[in-house]
């Protein structure tokens, strides 16, 4: 085993900042090869700090100190020390102004944290700890200050200079330099600082807030891409209006700017009034973006805008509280998308994402609570648990206290904490105080890792004409948490009957009305409730559990295939119907994997698909998600030991067989849903395309060696959604047309890196061991840029996380290749490398042969002395499984 020199920091060690900052003035002399930053910061001792040390330690990395002045006087060399990551002032007064002049090299900054270049333009990424690569500072989210920024740059190359807040002045000097000054009146932590400098074009709109203030809204893009930013603008204006209507939250400055850049580690960043986006999540037009891209753009644009209140006006006390802003803001963007599109489909997709990504996290060696209690590298904690499970936790509060009390709780949260850096407890306290409901046990959702398992048994009591339901919860141990306490779980449930369909009920002894759905607050390990129904005697009643996915739990209700089919058909909740159909498919898949007899389940599954297809015209988007078989990742979660090849083959065979059986039905769907009207990205049109393309995919599987229809669809489509769907269908075949279409696609879009990413992903996804050789070859393709995180994600992450056949090649080459790439990328971008290293986290859950190869790869990364702290944390924790 390699060295374990991780130095974790702990939530329990939190101390208030030793100093407060009254104001920050930053001056940038921008030059790609040598940027000089001068910061003037007014510090004052924090009266709330526990221990009063004589000196002050400031964070700083990868910068060179040139001058240091305290209250205007140069500090003698023995008054301070400089290390790799700190500037230590040995003794400082109660209050003082520190002037720090440093240098950095944006052109050499390949980590994409701090100040760097993208496409020849300057941009910044400071969350979570990038500001320390710009100047020495108290780089922590609980130090808030107003910022003034002055930038100077060559006016020819960098005519546009943006930062946070209000534009104070801009001028071009005679020597061609241009200067801009910005001032942000809202105190903010330094992770929300941003600047952008370069030649950018923009589109602009004006938004009038509900109190009548006019806001200038601009989106800046590479010249020539203005039209591709129009959809994002439309989303942004709708999000601004929605936040006023639903939360009563108005925008608070005169200007709101958004910039798209090509080199970005994550999706987008909510810097105060200067959001910076990965261009993948901003640019769209019918020829280059799919309907799914449009939907992602809508949700991310809204997400970053919503952060202005949930994240910026109220921020996190420390990075352990990350979910305070992320979970809440994801919940808000999910609500927004549900209102803008189909609420049912939105919910099903959100749950599906959570199950495919967060459930495995919770099951593995990297499991951590929504609020982690320790970390070595905070960049590794921007996880599905913090974001997606965090959103579910907020949703459960919404469910438990009701939407009225939830809104009151939000209002209270803003009045209490505006301008502060707070904790998850503060958020829950506001919800508790506004609702009068006790949420103390509920707080465990922030502190206990793992997915609770809910088991249910129900029994019909014919004498009392009641249905008794016994619910019990179990939470398995996770790393560092062996003992678990029962959680407070809101379980939405109701009765479905084979004869009557949905049946209203009420809890025994309850005087209220009969209702279709009840929210049961499960607080103990085990509880029995009794339901009386409106109709008295029932023929075949089944309890439908966790409707709407009311809690992020794993439900094991041991329902028979016919019970599942009944719920899939009759449940009033679209999520419950979808979930039951998924369970039915899982029953079949798991049965076939273990060669068990599942004839009945299989018949019911196919009947369900056939019936859904017959109703295709009612709600195409919903039928599309209903038809999809559970992914390999979902199947894997139910297996003792994962055999990726067997899972792939079993799933593929079932798809092909269903395709053959229902060929006529899908041909009918394909033909009826054809559409001659011009492309529109709206949800209705997108839903029709989605179902038609799903039908095309199935038809292609029905005739694997004759993919003529898919190729024709590919050639004739006038938009990326259809073109890509046809290509994805062809990619599931082994035909000459597959290669032909992939090549045609690549040459058609040879000058568009974002579209080429779609091509790289399909190449990386091809279910054939030889896909590995192709991926290797593509690393040398002229359009592959190994420094760009989007390329890394499209080719390497897609391969490692989603190609079960080639990544898990029996000879172990897939593992070796990815480990090599992680170590390579780690040299210049540790954050991206660490994400890729996550592909091995489930290693211990695989079958013997695979397991050893994955462990070898992890050990090799662990033994490499150059491995960064980012990758090391993922690797060592994975190995400790
Ligand atoms: N706060 C960003 C978001 O919404 C996340 C983010 C953007 C980020 N860039 C990052 C996180 C870089 C870590 C590193 O949701
Ligand atoms: Zn966010």
Image (cartoon, rainbow, N blue to C red):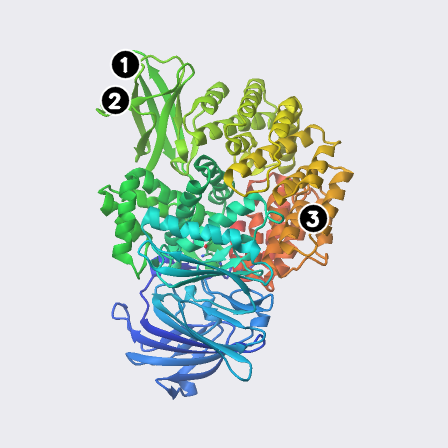
Judge from the rendering whether residue 32 lies leftward or rightward of residue 213; answer left or right: right
How far apart are the alpha carbons under marks 2 and 3? 61 Å
Q: Position of residue 858 (x, y in %)?
A: 59, 52
The residue located at (51%, 78%) in the rendering is: 178
**Mark 2 residue CB less than 8 A from any atom of ligand 2:** no
State yes or no: discs 2 and 1 in contact (Cβ < 8 Å): yes
Q: Position of residue 762 (x, y in %)?
A: 66, 45
SS of the residue under disc 3: helix
The residue located at (44%, 73%) in the rendering is: 86
How far apart are the alpha carbons under marks 2 and 1? 10 Å
Reading the image, the residue beneath label 1 is 464
First in sequence, mark 3 or 1: give its number.
Answer: 1
Count how many numbered circles sit on residues in the image: 3
Instruction: Mark 1: give few (<14), some (14-19) or many (20+) Cα within 10 Å.
Output: few
Judge from the rendering whether residue 686 lies leftward or rightward of residue 16; answer left or right: right
Reading the image, the residue beneath label 3 is 813
First in sequence, mark 2 or 3: give its number.
Answer: 2
State yes or no: discs 3 and 1 in contact (Cβ < 8 Å): no
How far apart are the alpha carbons under marks 3 and 1? 64 Å
């Amino acid at each position: 085993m390699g060295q374990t020199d991780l130095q974790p920091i702990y939530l329990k060690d939190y101390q208030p900042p030793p100093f407060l900052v009254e104001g920050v003035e930053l001056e940038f002399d921008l030059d790609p090869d040598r940027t000089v930053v001068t910061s003037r910061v007014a510090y004052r001792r924090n009266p709330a700090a526990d221990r009063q040390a004589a000196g002050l330690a400031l964070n700083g990395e990868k910068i060179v100190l040139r001058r240091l002045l305290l209250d205007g006087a140069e500090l003698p060399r023995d008054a301070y020390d400089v290390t790799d990551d700190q500037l230590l002032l040995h003794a400082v007064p109660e209050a003082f102004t520190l002037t720090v002049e440093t240098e950095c090299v944006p052109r050499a900054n390949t980590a994409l944290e701090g100040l760097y270049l993208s496409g020849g333009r300057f941009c910044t990424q400071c969350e979570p700890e990038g500001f320390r690569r710009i100047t020495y500072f108290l780089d922590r989210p609980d130090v808030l200050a107003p910022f003034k920024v002055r930038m100077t740059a060559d006016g020819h190359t960098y005519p546009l200079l943006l930062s946070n807040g209000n534009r104070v002045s801009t001028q071009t000097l005679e020597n061609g330099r241009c200067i801009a000054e910005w001032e942000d009146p809202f105190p903010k932590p330094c992770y929300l600082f941003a600047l952008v400098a370069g030649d950018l074009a923009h589109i602009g709109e004006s938004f009038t807030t509900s109190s009548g203030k006019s806001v200038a809204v601009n989106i800046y893009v590479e010249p020539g891409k203005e039209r591709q930013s129009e959809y994002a603008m439309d989303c942004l204006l709708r999000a601004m209006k929605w936040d006023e209507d639903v939360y009563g939250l108005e925008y608070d400055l005169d200007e709101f700017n958004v910039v798209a850049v090509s080199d970005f580690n994550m999706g987008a960043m909510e810097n105060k009034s200067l959001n910076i986006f990965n261009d993948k999540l901003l640019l769209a037009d019918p020829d280059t973006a799919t309907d799914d891209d449009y939907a992602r753009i809508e949700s991310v644009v809204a997400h970053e805008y919503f952060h202005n209140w949930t994240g910026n006006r109220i921020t996190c006390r420390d990075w352990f509280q990350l979910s305070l802003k992320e979970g809440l803001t994801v919940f808000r963007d999910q609500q927004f998308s549900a209102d803008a599109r189909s609420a049912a489909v939105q919910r099903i997709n959100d749950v599906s994402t959570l199950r495919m990504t967060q459930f495995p996290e919770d099951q593995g060696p990297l499991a951590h609570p929504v609020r982690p209690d320790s970390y070595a590298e905070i960049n590794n904690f921007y996880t599905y648990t913090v974001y997606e499970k965090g959103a579910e936790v907020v949703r459960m509060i919404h469910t438990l206290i009701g939407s009225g009390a939830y809104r009151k709780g939000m209002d209270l949260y803003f009045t209490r904490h505006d301008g502060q850096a707070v904790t998850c407890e503060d958020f829950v306290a506001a919800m508790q105080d506004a609702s009068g409901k006790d949420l103390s046990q509920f707080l465990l959702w922030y502190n206990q890792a793992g997915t609770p398992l809910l088991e249910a048994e129900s029994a019909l009591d014919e004498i009392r004409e009641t249905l008794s339901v016994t619910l019990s919860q179990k939470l398995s141990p996770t790393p560092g948490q062996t003992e678990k306490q029962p959680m407070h779980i809101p379980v939405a449930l109701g009765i479905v009957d084979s004869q009557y369909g949905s049946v209203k009920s009420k809890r025994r002894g309850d005087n209220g009305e009969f209702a279709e759905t009840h929210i049961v607050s499960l607080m103990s390990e085990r509880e029995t409730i009794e339901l009386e129904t409106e109709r008295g005697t029932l023929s075949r009643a089944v309890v439908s559990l966790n409707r709407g996915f009311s809690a992020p739990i794993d439900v094991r209700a041991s329902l028979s295939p016919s019970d599942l089919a009944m719920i899939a058909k009759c449940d009033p909740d679209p999520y419950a119907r979808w979930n039951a159909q998924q369970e039915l498919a899982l029953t079949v898949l798991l049965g076939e994997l273990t060669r068990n007899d599942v004839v009945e389940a299989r018949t019911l599954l196919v009947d369900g698909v056939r019936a859904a297809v017959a109703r295709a015209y009612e709600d195409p988007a919903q039928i599309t998600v209903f038809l999809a078989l559970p992914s390999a990742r979902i199947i894997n979660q139910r297996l003792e030991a994962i055999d990726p090849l067997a899972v792939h083959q079993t799933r593929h065979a079932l798809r092909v067989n269903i395709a053959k059986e229902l060929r006529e039905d899908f041909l009918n769907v394909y033909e009826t849903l054809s559409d001659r009207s011009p492309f529109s990205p709206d949800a209705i049109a997108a839903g029709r395309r989605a179902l038609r393309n799903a039908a095309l995919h199935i038809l292609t599987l029905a005739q694997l060696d004759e993919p003529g229809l898919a190729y024709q669809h590919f050639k004739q489509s006038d938009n990326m959604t259809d073109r890509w769907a046809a290509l994805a269908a062809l990619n599931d075949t082994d035909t000459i047309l597959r290669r032909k279409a992939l090549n045609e696609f690549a040459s058609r879009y040879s000058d568009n890196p974002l579209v080429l990413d779609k091509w790289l992903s399909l190449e990386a996804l091809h279910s054939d061991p030889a896909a590995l050789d192709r991926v290797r070859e593509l690393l040398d393709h002229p359009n592959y840029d190994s420094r760009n995180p989007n390329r890394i994600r499209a080719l390497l992450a897609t391969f490692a996380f989603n190609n079960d056949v080639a990544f898990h090649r029996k000879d172990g080459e897939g593992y070796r290749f990815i480990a090599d790439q992680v170590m390579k990328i780690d040299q210049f971008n540790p954050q991206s490398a660490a994400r890729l290293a996550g592909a091995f986290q489930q290693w211990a859950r695989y079958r013997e042969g695979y397991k050893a190869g994955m462990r070898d790869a992890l050990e090799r990364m662990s033994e490499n002395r150059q491995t960064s702290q980012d990758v090391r944390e993922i690797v060592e924790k994975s190995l400790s499984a």
